[in-house]
Amino acid sequence: MKNDYVDFVEVNALSKTPYRNRISSLLMLITLLVFIVVFLDSKLAGFFSLVLTILFFIALVLIVKEWIVARLAFNRSPFRRLKQFILVNKLYDEETREFGKDKKQRKKVIVNSAYFLFKLADDELIIRAMKHGDKYTDRANTYDSMLSALFGLELSNKVENINYCEYIFKTEADERLIVRKNESEYNQSTIIPLNSNIGWDIQKFPHALIAGATGGGKTSFINYLIIEILKMRGELLIADPKHSDLYSLHHFLGTERVAGEPNQIARIVRIAKEQMDTRFKEYKGGNSEASYGKNYRDFDLPPVFIIVDELGALRMGAEKKVFSEIMSNLQEVILKGREMGVFVILATQQPNAQNIPTEVRDNLSLRVSLGNLSKEGERMAFGGIDGDLPTVEGKGSGYIFLDGMGWNNPKSFQAPFLDYEKFNFVEEIKKYANITNY
């Protein structure tokens, strides 16, 4: 347990200014006094006194400058801000006590306070609101928006346990990826970059849900994922029951891999499942110990992605039996596909239980919402959420939740921006599709 508190600094209402800051003020005062003494000492020779005075003056200016910089840094420091936070919000208890021989002097003294710990680590500011069994214990998990406003940082994660509530802030903001035309680049890893700090490792955290209101940027984000999948030399199967932009890719990828009608969609979903089953039979079906613990990359197999855009339209347009078959096969791929490199990306405007059953959603490691969803939509996309998600503005803006990141809540997200003035999606498709033998 002790290691859990290494490098943390404690702050409460009674905390004193750190020693180094008090020493810096003392040194500046001593330097100033020495300068005054030298300046007033008339016993020194005139020229020597002048030179010494100038040198001390220069030294004083430099020291004062450094002191001002250090003081400004201290005023912006987590220690200073947290202490002011405690005092301004009166997170302390006072008692009036009597002093003096006759006990006639009275003074208010602080007898208890909320306790915080903080640590700066890499690109994170970690703040812990401690739980000591006093009246501040119940408030330890309520400081989200207040601490975010105090430091001007977005809350990245919040973790609560019996001893404290931990707030984690990113000191370096996520930067949106800007996608422009480039030479053929191949991704030899299993990670698809989503922004400057977040990457989706498909092997560790398979399958995705993309929920997006009309005009939210869902299609553009799917376009980005398609290019990244092709860079992995991955195989694509695309279902677009609305016969919109994604369906037009059948001109380049072929009608055997791009479907629009429910029966055609059922066929390509069946292809994905059969491909998964075939891989299991060929590479894992024997009794050889050599295949134990291995996955598709160990067998040099390309990843296979099936993208189903707008499940709501598919459900409305398909016969009940056909839709049931589609969802059954998708669910089996979602549950078993990771090991053999078969992955599912589901997209919908309405992430409700009719379109995406809860047991399916809970097995989708990456969940992204673009644009503003209804409260029910947010709940269906992300599960339980502490509080409401703030409104987002701008195409491609929304929220993201990715398994394995330690997040309790989704965090704000900007999908990669495809600069269509400098990025021709169709030409990129042709380039990579040709190389991947479509």
Image: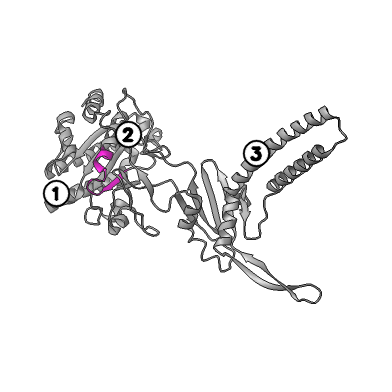
* Mark 2 closeness class: few <14, some 14–19, many ≥20 residues within 10 Å: some
> In the figure, residue 337 lies in which quadrant?
top left
Q: Which quadrant, please, contains the C terminus?
A: top left
**Horizontal arrangement in the rendering, residue 13 relative to residue 317 (left or right):** right
Q: Could you tell me how far apart the alpha carbons at marks 2 and 1 are, in whole angstroms?
A: 30 Å
Please name the residue that numbered disc 3 is placed on.
Answer: 65
In three-dimensional space, the C-alpha distance between marks 3 and 1, rounded to whole angstroms, equals 75 Å
User: Is residue 130 visible from the viewing direction of this image?
Assistant: no
Among the two numbered marks 3 and 1 on one chain, the one whose residue lies closer to the N terminus: 3
Outermost residue, right side: 43
Q: In this view, does 71 lie above or below 279?
A: below
Q: Give the residue type that dot 2 points to.
A: Tyr
Magenta region: 207-222
Q: Name the residue under label 2.
A: 283
The tag earlier along the polypeptide, 2 or 3, is 3
Helix, strand or loop status at disc 2:
helix
Inspect the magenta stretch and tell me whether residue 58 lies in it.
no
- At 66% from the left edge and 72% from the top edge, which residue is drawn? 95
